[in-house]
Image (cartoon, rainbow, N blue to C red):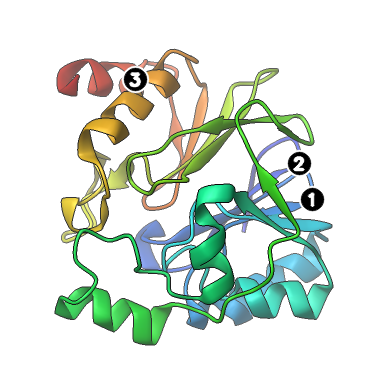
């Protein structure tokens, strides 16, 4: 676990930052896959949490949400369009195809049990000093979190900062295989680029120091 800004911690859950979660001002953002529990448990015992929120309910983001919420007795938040998958545990439900071999593998081995959502989050809600931003496309109810005072952006899977096959660092669109609406996702990327974020945290890939406007340049190329 690494502190990357005031009250913001990065928890890499798989080698080379291939799956990440974060603690922001006492809120656990995402929870990796089922096998991530031991790692997250250790970190949460070091940096206590009072709640848990999902950027979206795909198998690599809700994997141990149920057990974390039970173990630490914290409420679970997500967007209203993510509630069905969050509570049922059917995490691959909105994939373009949830019957291919990868989707079936993720649902069986990565996805965790469903858990009751205590509160839904919508555009412009606040999570501590972070503003909730609706960023649909990769999933219908995907949300991101942005803190104005220092430009920290928790992006989830609107983009990745690695090639998911090679694990080589670099900005990419999320794979079509797991993305509900590619055009809508690009529109969400444009929205996030207009925030001029300073530090960008991804669901997949290392944290990006955006001092050279790397993110904005990437978005300009794909829009």
3D distance between C-alphas at marks 2 and 1:
7 Å
Neighbour class for label 1 at 10 Å: few (<14), some, many (≥20)?
A: some
Q: Quadrant of the C terminus?
A: top left
First along the sequence among labels 3 and 1: 1
Q: Are marks 2 and 1 in contact (CB under 8 Å)?
A: yes
Q: Are marks 3 and 2 in contact (CB under 8 Å)?
A: no
Image point (65%, 73%), residue name: 115
Disc 3 target residue: 190
Q: Is residue 33 above or below residue 25?
A: below
Image point (38%, 46%), residue name: 157
First along the sequence among labels 3 and 2: 2
Q: Quadrant of the N terminus?
A: bottom right
Pick the residue in front: 202 or 182.
182
| Label disc, if present, on residue 7 of the rendered structure | 2
3D distance between C-alphas at marks 3 and 2:
27 Å
The local secondary structure at tag 2 comes to loop
Disc 1 target residue: 26
Figure quadrant of residue 50: bottom right
Pick the residue in front: 221 or 86.
86
The local secondary structure at tag 3 comes to helix
Instruction: Give the residue furthest to the bottom.
Output: 108
Q: Position of residue 194 (x, y in %)?
A: 43, 13
Pick the residue in front: 48 or 4.
48
Image point (25%, 74%), residue name: 103
Neighbour class for label 2 at 10 Å: few (<14), some, many (≥20)?
A: few
3D distance between C-alphas at marks 3 and 1:
28 Å
């Amino acid at each position: 676990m690494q502190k990357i800004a005031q009250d913001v911690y990065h928890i890499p859950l798989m080698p080379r930052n291939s799956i990440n979660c974060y603690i922001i001002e006492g809120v656990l953002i995402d929870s990796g896959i089922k096998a991530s529990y031991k790692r997250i448990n250790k970190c949460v015992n070091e940096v206590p949490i009072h709640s848990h929120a999902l950027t979206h309910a795909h198998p690599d983001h809700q994997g141990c949400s149920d057990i974390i919420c039970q173990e630490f007795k914290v409420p679970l938040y997500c967007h209203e369009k993510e509630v069905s998958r969050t509570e049922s545990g059917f995490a691959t439900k909105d994939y373009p195809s949830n019957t291919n071999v990868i989707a079936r593998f993720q649902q069986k081995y990565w996805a965790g049990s469903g858990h009751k959502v205590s509160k839904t989050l919508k555009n412009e809600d606040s999570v501590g000093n972070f503003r909730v931003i609706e960023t649909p496309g990769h999933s219908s109810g995907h949300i991101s979190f942005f803190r104005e005072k220092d430009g920290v952006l928790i992006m989830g899977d609107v983009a990745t900062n690695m090639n998911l096959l090679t694990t080589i660092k670099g900005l990419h669109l999320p794979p079509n295989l797991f993305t509900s609406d590619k055009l809508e996702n690009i529109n969400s990327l444009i929205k996030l680029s207009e925030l001029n974020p300073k530090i960008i945290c991804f669901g997949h890939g290392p944290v990006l120091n955006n001092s050279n406007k790397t993110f904005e340049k990437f978005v300009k190329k794909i829009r």
